[in-house]
Image (cartoon, rainbow, N blue to C red):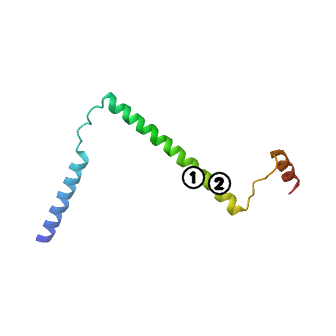
């Protein structure tokens, strides 16, 4: 009986503690000055440009991998010649 009371007390304490942690509020962040805002904007722009570049490289790599594994060979002639020859082969 005593062990059960200890277990119930610990469980209740854990529940109350987790409820208090969820309800706690953090202090507000200090306001940013103009220099900080400009630095953050420059950093965000650089990050966005790098992510766009990485995405382009990944897409190019995926296309090259797809073409390599599917056996697709890029035509050497003009676009009209390849379209005409492709439409005749079915």
Res 13 visible = yes
Q: Is residue 72 left or right of residue 45?
A: right
Graded by Cα atoms within 10 Å as few (under 14), some (14 to 19) or many (20 or more), the crowding at tag 1 reads few
Q: Earlier in the sequence, mark 2 or mark 1?
A: 1
Q: Is residue 8 above or below residue 18?
A: below
Q: Nearer the viewer, residue 36 or 11?
A: 36
Q: Quadrant location of the N terminus?
A: bottom left
Residue 30, percent across and down? Answer: 25, 34
Query: Which residue is outermost to the front?
Result: 76
Regarding residue 1, the answer to whether it shows in the image is: no
Dot 1: what SS? Answer: helix
Give the total number of marks visible in the rendering. 2
Pick the residue in front: 5 or 90. 90
> In the displayed image of the protein, which residue is found farthest to the top?
34
**Who's the residue at 16% across and 69% down the image?**
4
Q: CA distance from mark 2 to mark 1?
A: 9 Å
Direction from residue 7 to residue 62 in the image, left or right: right
Q: Is residue 34 left or right of residue 68?
A: left
Residue lying furthest left: 2
Q: Residue at x 61, y 55 (%)?
A: 62
Badge number at residue 5: none
Pinpoint residue 51: horizontal percent, then vertical percent: 50, 45
The image quadrant that residue 69 belongs to is bottom right
Mark identifier at residue 58:
1
Q: Nearer the viewer, residue 15 or 5?
A: 15
According to the image, label 2 marks what residue? 63
Is 63 above or below relative to 5?
A: above
């Amino acid at each position: 009986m005593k062990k059960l009371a200890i277990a119930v007390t610990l469980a209740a304490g854990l529940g109350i503690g987790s409820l208090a942690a969820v309800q706690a509020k953090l202090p507000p962040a200090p306001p940013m000055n103009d220099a900080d805002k400009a630095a953050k904007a420059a950093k965000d722009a650089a990050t966005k440009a790098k992510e766009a570049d990485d995405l382009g490289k990944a897409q190019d790599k995926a296309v090259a991998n797809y073409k390599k594994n599917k056996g697709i060979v890029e035509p050497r002639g003009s676009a009209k010649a390849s379209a005409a020859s492709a439409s005749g082969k079915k």
